[in-house]
Image (cartoon, rainbow, N blue to C red):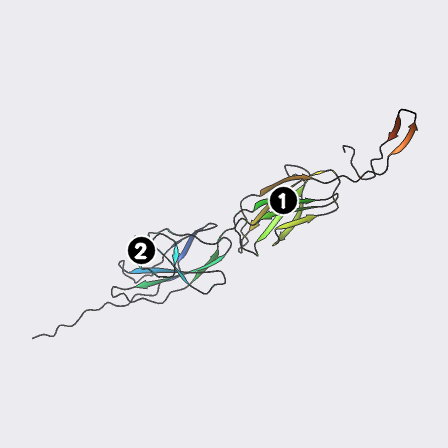
Amino acid sequence: GPVVLNSTSTLCEVPPVPSITNVYSSSITISINTGVNNSYWSKYSIKVTSGVSSTPQYVQANGALNTVAIYQTTATWTNSIFIIGLIPNTTHTISVSAQNSNNVNTLYGAEVSTSTLCVLPIAGVYTVNQTSITASWLSGGNPSGTEYYCQRSTSSDFTLTADGGWATAISTNSESLTRNTTYYFRVKSRNNNFVETIGYVSLGSTVTLCEVPPVPSLTSVSTSSIIFGINAGSDNPYWS
């Protein structure tokens, strides 16, 4: 009689580079490109490496990352896959593997990389002197190396500003300021792809200190009274 041969499945095509559709501070949305030759019942796994780490992680059914790869059809993954729980302002590299009906996997295909967005920094504290102010802020969860841009103004609407430029420090020192004057500060951040946060975070305002007045001038002395004049100093403004 005839010899019964076992069946087998042909291998999948290695998937092309996935498409990034949206980027946020802690998530990225992608879609899988299956290639032109893979059957609709083929299954796919999504690999992610983040930052300087060479340890891969894999997207799970709920969008979170884990060290175990799972394979699902594109119908299960859907056309909009949210990869969640990512670190802000970190470069994430994404690739896809396909699996045939015999659970034989392809290599992971071409990679695509992007950086998650920054989160807005958080207002910190001031260190105030007569002619200088150090304004500081908290990273808000952005990793070290994130760049910040701080503006200073004597106007609350920032119509006239002094800009500190982009820097990785989480504070800025302003010098040669006018004594007893209100200064307003605000700050924003940008990611590794130079995408800035939307708008600034207000750091509020503070007032520089007055100069210590010099010795007052005695003008008249009597048995029950003294008349003297205040010497304001050369640098205190008239409203002090």
Residue 44 versus residue 174: which sits nearer the camera?
Answer: 174
Q: Which residue is mark 1?
A: 125
Residue at the location (60% across, 47% down)?
A: 137
Q: Is residue 149 placed above or below 7 in the rendered structure? A: above
The residue under label 2 is which amino acid type?
Thr
Q: Which residue is mark 2?
A: 74
| Mark found first going from the N terminus, 1 or 2 | 2
Q: Is residue 149 placed above or below 154 in the rendered structure? A: below
Q: Which secondary structure lies at badge 1?
A: strand
Q: How many marks?
A: 2
Residue 64 versus residue 39: which sits nearer the camera?
Answer: 64
Q: Position of residue 105 (x, y in %)?
A: 31, 66
Residue mark closest to the camera, 1 vs 2: 1
The residue under label 1 is which amino acid type?
Val
Classify the position of the C terminus by image quarter: top right
Classify the position of the N terminus by image quarter: bottom left
Q: Which secondary structure lies at badge 2?
A: helix
Quarter of image, res 9: bottom left
Would residue 156 appear left or right of 222 to someone viewing this image? left
Q: Position of residue 27 (x, y in %)?
A: 44, 51
Q: Position of residue 16 (x, y in %)?
A: 38, 62
Q: Position of residue 115 (x, y in %)?
A: 49, 55
